[in-house]
Amino acid sequence: MYSKLAEKLRFSLEPVAIYFTDERPEAALQFEEGKRGCVAAMLVASAKGETAVFDDRTYGCSGGGVGLCFGDTFTKDNSPTEYRLSTGDAALAAAGKEQTASLGRGERFFATAELASKWRRGFPYAETAKKYVVFKPLGAADGAAPPDLICLFANPDQLSALIIMSGFNSGEALCAVAPFGAACHSIAYAYQESRKECPRGIIGFTDISQRHRIPKEILSYTVPYAMYLDIESGIDESCLTTGAWEKIEGRCVSCL
């Protein structure tokens, strides 16, 4: 699928098309059932040319299942998420749970397990009715079967343009948000936005435990496919045709 937006903004990583589907692609990367894996790593792999597929038995970890819209897999997997995100093993021991060496002191994203539980309870869990979630490089996507979401990887200049363009045809000021979550949780947040009359783009990959997977200047921007098309429709009349953009356009070097 041709991307006018990718051509204009010169992304260094290819946009990723995200599908909720009942069709499993051939020759796709997939985690082994019961084996731990990182959905964010698969997202980056797709931005570099791979196709990946997940189902409700191969989502890699509890957080990954949540991000892929397989429901509340924190609860399904009996995951000690509130401790992992906060104070780690000491809290696990105090709760009478078996210590896990990998938790260490916890990720310290929240001051206490109670605060992490507040986030966990408020997360917008979604459960897709489809069997698979598929990541594809946008260039390999079939225009006849459009994706549900698009994940774009952008530097500050590109992200600035994307945020502006997200309100170009709507007049909305709050057209992008950056909610807390794992790197893959932008998918679930964008899935929620796709159900709204005025969806917002999701700024993501602010999860410092996964930042090492992408260049230091890059964040993700995940949008419903209809919103992506709306952004593309305004390119020829937008700020991307002005001298202001020309002054910084040369700093965006495409690797596509």
Image (cartoon, rainbow, N blue to C red):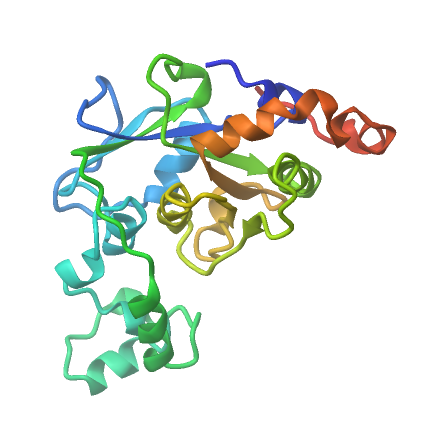
- For residue 33, which quarter of the picture? top left
Q: Identify the residue at horizontal 63%, vertical 44% (top origin).
A: 217
Numbered marks: total: 0
Tell me residue 211's x, y (percent): 50, 50
Please, which residue is most extreme toward the bottom here?
A: 94
Position of residue 230 in the picture relative to residue 234 (left or right): left
**Residue 13 in sight:** no
Q: Does 60 sit above or below residue 91?
A: above
Q: Identify the residue at horizontal 46%, vertical 30% (top origin).
A: 226
Foreground of the two, 239 or 28:
239
Tell me residue 247's x, y (percent): 85, 31
Position of residue 2 in the picture relative to residue 181 (left or right): right
- For residue 125, which quarter of the picture? bottom left
Q: Quadrant of the N terminus?
A: top left
Tell me residue 75's x, y (percent): 17, 63
Q: Does 191 sit above or below residue 86?
A: above
Foreground of the two, 173 or 223:
173
**Residue 216 in sight:** yes
Foreground of the two, 100 or 219:
219
Q: Quadrant of the C terminus?
A: top right
Q: Does 224 sit above or below residue 51?
A: below
- For residue 5, which quarter of the picture? top right
Tell me residue 245's x, y (percent): 80, 31
